[in-house]
């Protein structure tokens, strides 16, 4: 198969979209702070500062500080156990100055994810990991979305890429990225196939797709030779190869076949962080007096 020697793919950059979102959030935060007498609050529960995800979480806190959100680490002391983690989560659940909670992942192997996830107040679950929010998404109601999946679809919407009626393939079926991205694409009226590590002929599925969202954690999994010419590619993967950040898509070959593609870094990542802030302000507005503090809404 020959790759089409057409114009290079349009770069779908998350940075400029994220900057627009952050500017709007800063205004909302300022209004909230004046009218409620306190800033919106985020608690990031961390189970050890040496975990690789700490860098990402610090970035989120810096993003909060820039827009006036009161973000802080809540650090567990001593050996983390299920009961010590759930005790800390209950504390932030009960803290009226905290509107949103993020838990550092991955958890230590001795701690069950489900125990922790169940403990989060769904109205503070701004990264959509609680089963209630997962269920609301599945049913088409308006709960909190996992921010990465939200970003993967939002980057298409905000870049003016048509989704309705198009054939989409999502590579990866995790509860936090692949499946919620697939549900969101269905909600946007795409026809969606979900591929995973047991998919028999990944290339055949990808080749049919007009939109390809890749969240597998496998550098170079998707190459230009697998793509339908003109496909739109959203690369969610974040991998470190030889000290460099790369996605799951072989950018060099894919960008010669795709009509549009997200770079790594600079694509889905920056948008994820900005969208988390929008989830937080929404949670804060719901926690303000006179509103219902559970993430429900009208079916969309
Ligand atoms: P995960 O390991 O939980 O899930 C990976 C999924 O990919 C699984 O469903 C698996 O079946 C599928 N898969 C693995 N190898 C495959 C193969 N050879 N063919 C087809 N499917 C295959 O990972 P995750 O948490 O969903 O994260 C996926 C990627 O997204 C990772 O690279 C992660 O670092 C990245 N990520 C990015 C952001 C962001 O903000 N951009 C946030 C979270 C995760």
Image (cartoon, rainbow, N blue to C red):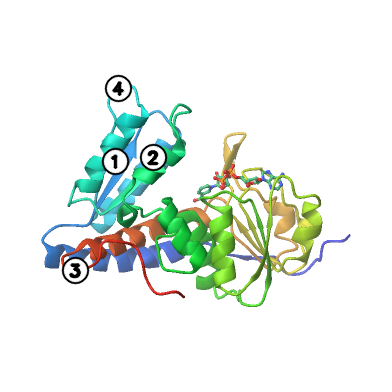
Left of 299 or right of it: where is 212?
A: right
- Which numbered mark, 1 or 3, is in the foreground of this view? 1
Residue linked to disc 1: 89
For residue 78, the mark is: 4
Label 4 to label 2, Cα distance in Å? 18 Å
Residue at disc 4, secondary structure = loop
Q: Given contact means CB atoms under 8 Å apart, are the residues at marks 1 and 3 in contact?
A: no
In this orientation, which residue lies closer to the viewer: 188 or 213?
A: 188
Measuring from the top left, give residue 169's x and y in whole percent: 68, 61
Indicate whether 7 appears above or below 89: below
- Which numbered mark, 4 or 2, is in the foreground of this view? 2
Residue at disc 3, secondary structure = helix
Residue linked to disc 3: 31
Residue at the image position 31 percent from the left and 36 percent from the top: 86
Label 1 to label 3, Cα distance in Å? 28 Å
Residue linked to disc 2: 116
Answer with mark 2 or mark 3, whichever residue precedes in sequence: 3
The reply to whether residue 107 is visible in this rendering is: yes
The reply to whether residue 104 is visible in this rendering is: no
Left of 81 or right of it: where is 182?
A: right
Residue at the image position 30 percent from the left and 61 percent from the top: 294
């Amino acid at each position: 198969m020959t790759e089409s020697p057409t114009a290079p793919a349009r770069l779908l950059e998350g940075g400029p979209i994220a900057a627009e979102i952050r500017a709007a959030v800063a205004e909302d935060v300022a209004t909230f702070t004046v009218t409620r007498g306190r800033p919106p609050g985020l608690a990031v529960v961390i189970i050890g500062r040496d975990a690789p995800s700490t860098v990402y979480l610090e970035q989120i806190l810096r993003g909060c500080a820039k827009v006036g959100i009161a973000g802080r680490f809540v650090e567990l002391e001593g050996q983390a156990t299920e009961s010590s983690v759930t005790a800390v989560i209950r504390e932030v659940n009960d803290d009226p100055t905290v509107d949103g909670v993020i838990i550092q992942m991955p958890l230590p192997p001795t701690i069950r994810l489900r125990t922790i996830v169940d403990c989060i107040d769904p109205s503070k679950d701004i990264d959509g990991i609680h089963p209630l929010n997962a269920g609301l998404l599945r049913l088409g109601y308006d709960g909190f979305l996992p921010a990465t999946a939200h970003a993967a679809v939002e980057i298409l919407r905000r870049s003016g890429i048509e989704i309705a009626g198009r054939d989409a393939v999502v590579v990866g079926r995790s509860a936090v990225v692949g499946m919620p991205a697939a549900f969101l694409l269905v909600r946007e009226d795409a026809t969606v196939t979900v591929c995973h590590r047991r998919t028999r002929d990944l290339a055949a599925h990808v080749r049919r797709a007009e939109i390809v969202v890749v969240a597998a954690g496998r550098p170079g999994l998707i190459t230009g030779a697998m793509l339908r010419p003109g496909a739109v590619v959203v690369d969610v993967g974040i991998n470190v190869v030889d000290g460099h950040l790369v996605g799951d898509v072989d950018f060099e070959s894919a960008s010669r076949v795709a009509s549009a593609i997200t770079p790594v870094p600079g694509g889905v990542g920056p948008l994820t962080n900005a969208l988390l802030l929008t989830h937080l302000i929404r949670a804060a507005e719901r926690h303000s007096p006179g509103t219902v503090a559970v993430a429900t809404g009208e079916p969309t």
